[in-house]
């Protein structure tokens, strides 16, 4: 795909169509802040080059029914990769994020980059074949990882859940198979991008929380993911919620991650089972040898008092940390995602109660706190958004290869 001679107006139209999920020529002119003639000229050029395509008429509002424009599938394909601490999801997507091929499986990032990224390369080749596409048709790659990333270089920096990954260039590894640019980001930033894409940028200031093996936060500020000066913005798992709490793997005491993330729920459940506080959890522990957050959730749904108390404790601690963010950032929405979002309504209610108790009245007047609507798909969707958004930006700046 030759991007080099596209005009700024044409790039603007491509970005507008992408974020709107498709638009008519009239809508494009308004959204891109162009005159009708300027928008029509840019659209005509992009259709002729095969970058935009018409996909049928929209409902009429009087007069001729307008044609819906979308990014053309013949532009190529995107590769989306969502690597979690214990899971891996991959997809081949069309430029409008239509999923053409998908795969997910269990993974362990502690196995190291060599094993994990080798597996990613094998699966991507298989998915491209399923999608009927080739490596030469890939226009951009987006990948999320469960650790802090220096975004410009794509390198992980001292990732606590990923020993052995620091200094490993995922980009260089993927470049052996693809000429397309690859962009690496923290997995919760990808969740935020996924929700931003779902919302078509209609919300400008919100937070996305991933609560699972770890706890992280994606920050959307003025319609863009905010990464901070070095790419570590949103590393909220190491905010202290109890100065007398247990020692975290980061070396500090009482971090919300060590007290409220998935392993903490499992630890509290085993303590309750061994102390005779829950016959249900004790039975599961004896049968399985260990307990998981899902065991706690199932016990809670069966009315287990100890399981309910564990869930409420975790939600209250997470809400305590989030109240500080609400007072500081004043978001319109907080979306809760990650593995712990599957626990159910008691967890969300505990988070809400803690936030409302500890936040200023003005900052919570219109605040909405809910589970992330995209759920487990948010990270993979965000990887697709990242791939196309940053590929367009790269070529717009004239640095594409």
Image: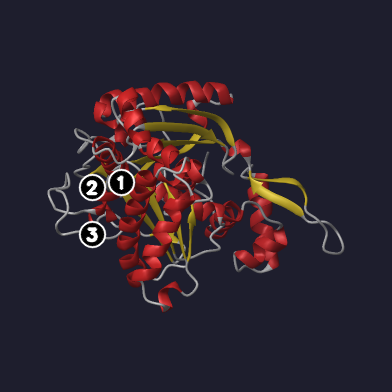
Q: Nearer the viewer, residue 216 or 315?
A: 315
Q: Residue at x 23, y 59 (%)?
A: 241
- The residue pinned by badge 2 equals 258
Q: Are marks 1 and 2 in contact (CB under 8 Å)?
A: yes
Q: Nearer the viewer, residue 315 or 398?
A: 315
- The residue pinned by badge 3 equals 241
Q: Is residue 16 left or right of residue 69?
A: left
Disc 3 residue crowd, few under 14, some 14–19, many 20+, Cα 10 Å: many
Asked whether residue 15 appears in the rendered view, the answer is yes
Q: Quadrant of residue 112?
A: top left
Q: Residue at x 43, y 67 (%)?
A: 331
Tell me how far mark 1 sits from mark 2, CA to CA. 6 Å
Circle number at residue 261? 1
Q: Residue at x 19, y 33 (%)?
A: 164
Q: Nearer the viewer, residue 83 or 53?
A: 83
Tell me how far mark 3 sits from mark 1, CA to CA. 13 Å
Tell me how far mark 2 sits from mark 3, CA to CA. 10 Å
Q: Is residue 373 above or below residue 281?
A: below
Q: Is residue 359 above or below residue 392?
A: below
Asked whether residue 393 appears in the rendered view, the answer is no
Element type at marker 3? loop
- The image shows a total of numbered marks equal to 3
Task: State the image coordinates of residue 160 (x, y, percent, origin top left).
Answer: 21, 42
Disc 1 residue crowd, few under 14, some 14–19, many 20+, Cα 10 Å: many
Name the outermost residue toward the left: 251
Task: State the image coordinates of residue 8 (x, y, percent, origin top left).
Answer: 52, 59
Q: Nearer the viewer, residue 138 or 263?
A: 263
């Amino acid at each position: 795909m030759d991007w080099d001679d596209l005009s700024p107006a044409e790039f603007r139209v491509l970005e507008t169509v992408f974020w709107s999920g498709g638009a008519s020529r009239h809508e494009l002119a308004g959204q891109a802040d162009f005159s009708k003639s300027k928008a029509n000229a840019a659209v005509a050029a992009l259709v002729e080059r095969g970058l935009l395509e018409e996909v049928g008429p929209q409902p009429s509002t009087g007069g001729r029914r307008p044609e819906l424009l979308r990014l053309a599938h013949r532009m190529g394909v995107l590769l989306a990769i969502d690597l979690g601490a214990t899971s891996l999801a991959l997809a081949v997507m069309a430029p409008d994020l239509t999923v053409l091929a998908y795969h997910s499986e269990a993974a362990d990032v502690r196995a190291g980059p060599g094993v994990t990224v080798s597996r990613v390369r094998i699966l991507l080749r298989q998915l491209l074949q399923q999608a009927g596409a080739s490596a030469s048709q890939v226009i951009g790659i987006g990948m999320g990882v469960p650790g802090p990333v220096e975004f410009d270089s794509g390198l992980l920096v001292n990732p606590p859940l990923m020993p052995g990954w620091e200094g490993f260039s995922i980009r260089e590894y993927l470049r052996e198979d693809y000429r397309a640019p690859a962009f690496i980001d923290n997995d919760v930033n990808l969740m935020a991008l996924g929700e931003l894409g779902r919302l078509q940028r209609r919300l400008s200031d919100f937070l996305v929380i991933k609560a699972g093996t770890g706890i992280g936060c994606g920050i959307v500020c003025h319609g863009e993911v905010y990464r901070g000066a070095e790419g570590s913005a949103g590393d909220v798992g190491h905010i202290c919620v109890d100065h007398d709490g247990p020692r975290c793997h980061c070396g500090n005491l009482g971090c919300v991650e060590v007290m409220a993330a998935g392993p903490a729920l499992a630890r509290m459940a085993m303590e309750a089972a061994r102390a005779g506080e829950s016959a249900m959890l004790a039975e599961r522990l004896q049968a399985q040898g260990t307990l998981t957050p899902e065991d706690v959730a199932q016990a809670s749904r069966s009315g287990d008092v100890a399981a309910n108390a564990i869930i409420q404790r975790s939600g209250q601690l997470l809400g305590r940390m989030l109240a500080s963010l609400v007072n500081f950032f004043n978001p319109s929405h907080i979306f809760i995602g990650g593995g712990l979002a599957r626990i159910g309504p008691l967890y969300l209610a505990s988070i809400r109660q803690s936030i409302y108790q500890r936040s200023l009245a003005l900052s919570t007047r219109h605040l909405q706190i809910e589970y992330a609507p995209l759920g487990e798909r948010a990270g993979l969707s965000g990887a697709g958004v990242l791939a196309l958004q940053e590929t367009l930006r790269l070529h717009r700046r004239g640095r594409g290869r």
